[in-house]
Image (spheres, rainbow, N blue to C red):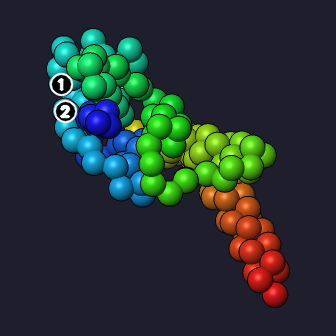
Amino acid sequence: MAAALKLISHKLCPYVQRAVIALNEKGIPFERLDIDLASKPDWFLKISPLGKVPVLVVTGDDGRQVALFESNVICEYIEDTQGGAKLHSRDALQRAQHRAWMEFGSTILSELWGLETTGDAAVFEAGRKSVAAKFERVEQALGEVIRGAFSAQV
């Protein structure tokens, strides 16, 4: 019997979406429980050392529960333990590149949050320029991937 998976989440959290996408892409059944981040339940704070979502609660065949936190860690666990299509290349270098870009994406998300929450126009403008430059870098990298894939087919 496979481990039961419960994803503790918040509807608007992009880091939760990373875990949801990985689970859905692999066709893995899971329970999702959304919590109010403005009023975090005590039980949640006991299993989430950082007080953040997502948290994946894994219940083994023996009934023991383990809480995994941080979206990248959760995605690695899903990739390492669950069936379905592989989300990353078997090639170690390509896998490392994927993980590096995931971290780059996390940096963009953090900067976007800063834009959403600042009331300082100068801070906003500097952040906007930084995020725009990062998106340009992502577009450049995606263009390189697409050109490489197209060249390989020709």
Nearest the eye: 36 or 153: 153
* Residue type at numbered disc 1: Ser
Residue drawn at the location 82% of the way across and 80% of the way down: 151
The answer, for residue 42, to whether it is visible in the render is yes
- Give the Cα distance between marks 2 and 1: 5 Å
**Quarter of the image containing the C terminus?**
bottom right
- Disc 1, SS: loop
Tell me where residue 9 appears, x and y as whole percent: 28, 37
| Disc marking residue 22 | none
Asked whether disc 2 touches disc 1, contact meaning CB atoms under 8 Å apart, the reply is yes
**To which residue does mark 1 refer?**
39
As drawn, is 35 to the left or to the right of 56? left
As drawn, is 40 to the left or to the right of 148? left
Q: In which quarter of the image is residue 44?
A: top left
Residue drawn at the location 45% of the way across and 48% of the way down: 83
Tell me where residue 140 appears, x and y as whole percent: 74, 65
Residue drawn at the location 23% of the way across and 20% of the way down: 63
- Disc 2, SS: loop
Q: Is residue 67 above or below residue 10?
A: above
Nearest the eye: 102 or 40: 102
Residue drawn at the location 79% of the way across and 72% of the way down: 148
**Quarter of the image containing the N terminus?**
top left
| Disc marking residue 36 | 2
Q: Is residue 35 above or below residue 30?
A: above
The total number of labels drawn is 2
Tell me where residue 56 appears, x and y as whole percent: 34, 31
As drawn, is 91 to the left or to the right of 16? right
The answer, for residue 121, to whether it is visible in the render is no
* Neighbours of disc 2 within 10 Å: few (<14), some (14-19), many (20+): few
